[in-house]
C-alpha cells in the first residue's frame, strides 16, 4: 500500500483514468489518500475522509510515508477558513480554497498564515458557514467556492464544523435521524430530494422560516414546503422532498 497527499490547491477526481471521464469529486490541498492501483499516468485512490475511490493523475499527487499518513489522519483536522488563501512554497504562492487541510503544511515544506478552523463549531454555526458559499456556481463534482455541487456543499459545510458526511446525497441520506415533519427541523438539518427515477439526487441545508440553502445552478436560498423546494423565480417546485435528517 502507498500513501499520498494533495499538494495542489484543487485536483479533480475522475470516474475513469481519463481527462474526459466524469469528475466525481475533488481533492483539496492537504487531503490524504491511499493509492490502490498505479498505472503509467493515473492512479486509483481511496480518500481518507470519506473513503471515496476514484482516479487521479500521477503528476498531481505527492507520496508520503505510512507513518506520516497515520500522523496526519489520526489528528484533528485544521482547515483553512477563508474563501481563498495561500500557502508559500519558497518564493511562490499556491492558492488554496476554503476547507483545505492544513495539517500537512510543514510536511510539504510550505508556510501558511491565514485563518484556521479547528472544525469543532456548534450546530448554530452551520448556516453561517453555508453563507460563505452563497452564489458559488454549480459544478458537478466540485467542492470549492469556485464551483460546488449539492452534496459537496453540504459535506464541506459540515466538515468545516467538525462533522463527517459521505460524498454523495444518497449516502448522506443514510446518516442521522429521520424527522416526520418540516416543523420538527432546526437550522442546519439536511433535506433530501428525489430525482425523476425516485432515487435521492439532491440535498440542502434547512434554515429558519421554511427556507433552504442549496446548490442548484448556484448556491441559493429558496422556500421549502412539504412538497419540496419552491423556486419563486421559476414559480414552481423544482425538487421533490423525500426526507429531512438530523445529523447533529
Image: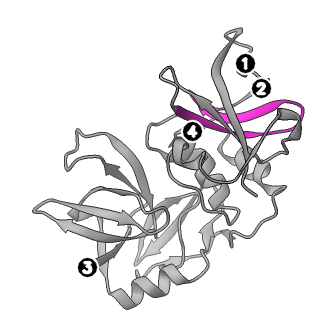
Does dot 2 land on a helix, a strand or a loop? strand
- Pointer 2 or 4: first along the chain: 4
Dominant SS type (magenta): strand
Vertical order, 230 against 132 (above or below): above
> What mark, if any, has residue 224 been given in the picture?
2
Q: Which residue is mark 4?
A: 150
Image-based side of 233 in relation to 72, left or right? right
Q: Which residue is mark 3?
A: 1
**Nearer to us in this view, 202 or 99:** 202
The residue positioned 45% from the left and 79% from the top of the image is 110
- Give the quadrant of residue 115: bottom right
> Which of the two discs, 4 and 3, sits closer to the camera?
3
Instruction: Give me the C-alpha separation between circle 3 and circle 1.
Output: 48 Å
> What mark, if any, has residue 230 been given in the picture?
1
Vertical order, 160 against 214 (above or below): below
The residue positioned 35% from the left and 64% from the top of the image is 46
Residues at marks 2 and 4 touching, judged by CB atoms closer than 8 Å: no
Residue 132: image location, x then y, percent? 69, 48
> Is residue 201 rendered magenta in the image?
yes
Instruction: Give me the C-alpha separation between circle 1 and circle 4.
Output: 16 Å
Does dot 1 land on a helix, a strand or a loop? strand
The residue positioned 31% from the left and 39% from the top of the image is 22
Q: Quadrant of the N terminus?
A: bottom left
**Nearer to us in this view, 47 or 136:** 47
Vertical order, 34 against 175 (above or below): below
The residue positioned 53% from the left and 79% from the top of the image is 103
Q: Magenta residues?
A: 200-219
- Pointer 4 or 3: first along the chain: 3
Image-based side of 167 in relation to 179, left or right? left
Amino acid at each position: 500500500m502507498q500513501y499520498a497527499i494533495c499538494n495542489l490547491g484543487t485536483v479533480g477526481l475522475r470516474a475513469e483514468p481519463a481527462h474526459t471521464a466524469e469528475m466525481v469529486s475533488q481533492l483539496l490541498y492537504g487531503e490524504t489518500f491511499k493509492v490502490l492501483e498505479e498505472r503509467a499516468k493515473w492512479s486509483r485512490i481511496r480518500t481518507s475522509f470519506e473513503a471515496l475511490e476514484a482516479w487521479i493523475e500521477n503528476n498531481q499527487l505527492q507520496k508520503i510515508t505510512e507513518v506520516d499518513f497515520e500522523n496526519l489522519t489520526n489528528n484533528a483536522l485544521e482547515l483553512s477558513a477563508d474563501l481563498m488563501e495561500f500557502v508559500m512554497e519558497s518564493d511562490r504562492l499556491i492558492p488554496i480554497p476554503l476547507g483545505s487541510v492544513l495539517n500537512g503544511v510543514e510536511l510539504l515544506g510550505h508556510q501558511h498564515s491565514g485563518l484556521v478552523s479547528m472544525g469543532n463549531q456548534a450546530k448554530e454555526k452551520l448556516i453561517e458557514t453555508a453563507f460563505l458559499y452563497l452564489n458559488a456556481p454549480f459544478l458537478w463534482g466540485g467542492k470549492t467556492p469556485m464551483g460546488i455541487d449539492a452534496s459537496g456543499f453540504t459535506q464541506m459545510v459540515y466538515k468545516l464544523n467538525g462533522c463527517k458526511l459521505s460524498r454523495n446525497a444518497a449516502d448522506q441520506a443514510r446518516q442521522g435521524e429521520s424527522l416526520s415533519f418540516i416543523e420538527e427541523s432546526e437550522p442546519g438539518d439536511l433535506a433530501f430530494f428525489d430525482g425523476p427515477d425516485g432515487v435521492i439526487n439532491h440535498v440542502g441545508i434547512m434554515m429558519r422560516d421554511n427556507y433552504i440553502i442549496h446548490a442548484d445552478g448556484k448556491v441559493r436560498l429558496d422556500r421549502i414546503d412539504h412538497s419540496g423546494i419552491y423556486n419563486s423565480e421559476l414559480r414552481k417546485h423544482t425538487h421533490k422532498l423525500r426526507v429531512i435528517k438530523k445529523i447533529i
